[in-house]
Image (spheres, helix red, strand yellow):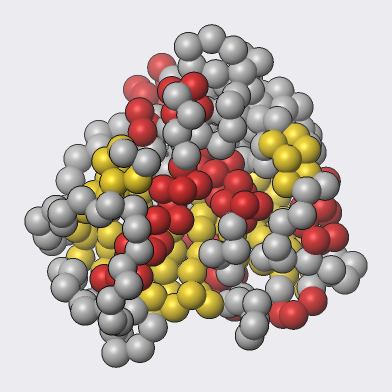
């Protein structure tokens, strides 16, 4: 059903309203855990041994050591299963940068869920042979990494499989879509300033929230190659040739067996929302005057914004709060 090609250049992720400093998030850090082999534990239920706050961890998948940060808020009650959100940074970003830039720890504090911030190798994610950068060139299996990441966290914390979600910006959004095409781990996906790449002929039903600026020139709202496209060739392959964003939303409505969407406009924000079978939903939020960015994210340093031609984050919407509200309203249905 879905056959599109698209990618992202390594400088793109910074256009999402992130900072360039990549320093410590300034929260309580635990010591790194021993590397995981990539095989889920067969032992009893998880023993909670993670510190409250932000802590660094490593995981070995396909012979590569992978890293991530995990944020456990004090407000998350671990006497019962808790929601997990996996936040995928954009190209040129990191897990630490995403933790700082998009306000997920603050949202987790308010609502009592756990957030994982994995790191792409060489600051990028592989979603196919033409996307993106060194991980794509080297054949890295990032779908396997995220699958093992979710399992590893479930070994350490009581994660609710019915309330496990993935969100991502730009190159991270490409991987988020790839994950819901190729796995059934996630109840819902929150995709920001991105598209779908590669074949996705029969994805499992999943709730979808897509947020996109109409002025985005990196992942064009109208589809087709973006401004950083190199046709998927060279040392760092980059190809961006996705479908028009409204068409992508319509395709997910078909997958989820949705009713006719309703449209609501509030200034520059246009919401096209549909209710679907089994309590799922598909919603497209368009921001008419926004570019390639994470709405409501941390502003870019002015000099970096100028030198790297980054779009400022829109203030018309708080993407993090909006995505969390969507996630919390759409767990996996029973038996789904």
Camera-side residue: 233 or 317? 233
Q: Can residue 46 be seen in this view?
A: yes
Where does the image place residue 155, in percent across and percent down from the top left? Answer: 30, 70
Where does the image place residue 18, in percent across and percent down from the top left? Answer: 39, 39
Query: Is 119 left, or right, of 269 in this rendering?
Result: left
Q: Residue at x 63, y 23 (%)?
A: 239
Is 165 located above or below residue 149 in the figure? below
Query: Is 197 left, or right, of 166 in this rendering?
Result: right
Q: Residue at x 65, y 45 (%)?
A: 212
- Residue pushed farthest right? 260
Query: Is 107 left, or right, of 170 in this rendering?
Result: left
Where is residue 292, by image quadrant?
A: top right
Camera-side residue: 306 or 117? 117
Q: Residue at x 78, y 38 (%)?
A: 3
Where is residue 28, by image quadrant?
A: bottom left
Q: Which residue is drawn at 67% across and 37% down?
A: 197
């Amino acid at each position: 059903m879905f056959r599109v090609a698209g990618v992202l250049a390594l400088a793109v992720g910074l256009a999402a309203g992130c900072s360039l400093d990549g320093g410590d998030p300034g929260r309580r850090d635990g010591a790194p855990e021993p590397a995981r082999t990539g095989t889920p534990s067969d032992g009893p239920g998880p023993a909670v041994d993670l510190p409250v706050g932000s802590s660094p961890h490593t995981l070995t998948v396909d012979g590569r050591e992978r890293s991530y940060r995990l944020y456990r808020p004090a407000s998350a009650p671990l006497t019962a299963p808790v929601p997990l959100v996996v936040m995928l940074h954009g190209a040129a970003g990191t897990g630490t940068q995403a933790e700082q830039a998009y306000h997920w720890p603050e949202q987790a504090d308010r609502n009592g869920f756990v957030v994982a911030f994995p790191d792409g190798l060489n600051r990028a994610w592989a979603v196919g042979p033409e996307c993106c950068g060194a991980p794509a060139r080297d054949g890295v299996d990032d779908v396997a990494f995220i699958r093992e990441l979710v399992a590893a966290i479930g070994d350490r914390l009581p994660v609710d499989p019915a309330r496990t979600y993935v969100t991502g910006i730009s190159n991270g959004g490409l991987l988020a879509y790839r994950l819901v095409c190729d796995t059934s781990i996630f109840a819902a996906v929150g995709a920001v300033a991105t598209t779908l790449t590669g074949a996705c002929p029969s994805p499992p039903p999943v709730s979808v929230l897509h947020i996109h600026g109409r002025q985005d020139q990196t992942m064009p709202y109208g589809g087709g190659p973006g401004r950083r496209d190199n046709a998927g060739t060279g040392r760092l392959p980059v190809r961006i040739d996705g479908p028009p964003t409204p068409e992508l939303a319509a395709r997910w409505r078909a997958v989820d067996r949705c009713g006719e969407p309703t449209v609501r406009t509030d200034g520059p924000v246009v919401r096209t929302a549909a209710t679907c079978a089994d309590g799922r939903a598909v919603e497209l939020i368009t921001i008419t005057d926004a570019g390639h960015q994470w709405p409501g994210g941390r502003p870019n340093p002015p000099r970096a914004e100028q030198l790297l031609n980054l779009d400022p984050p829109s203030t018309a919407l708080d993407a993090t709060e909006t995505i969390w509200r969507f996630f919390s309203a759409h767990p996996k249905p029973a038996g789904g």
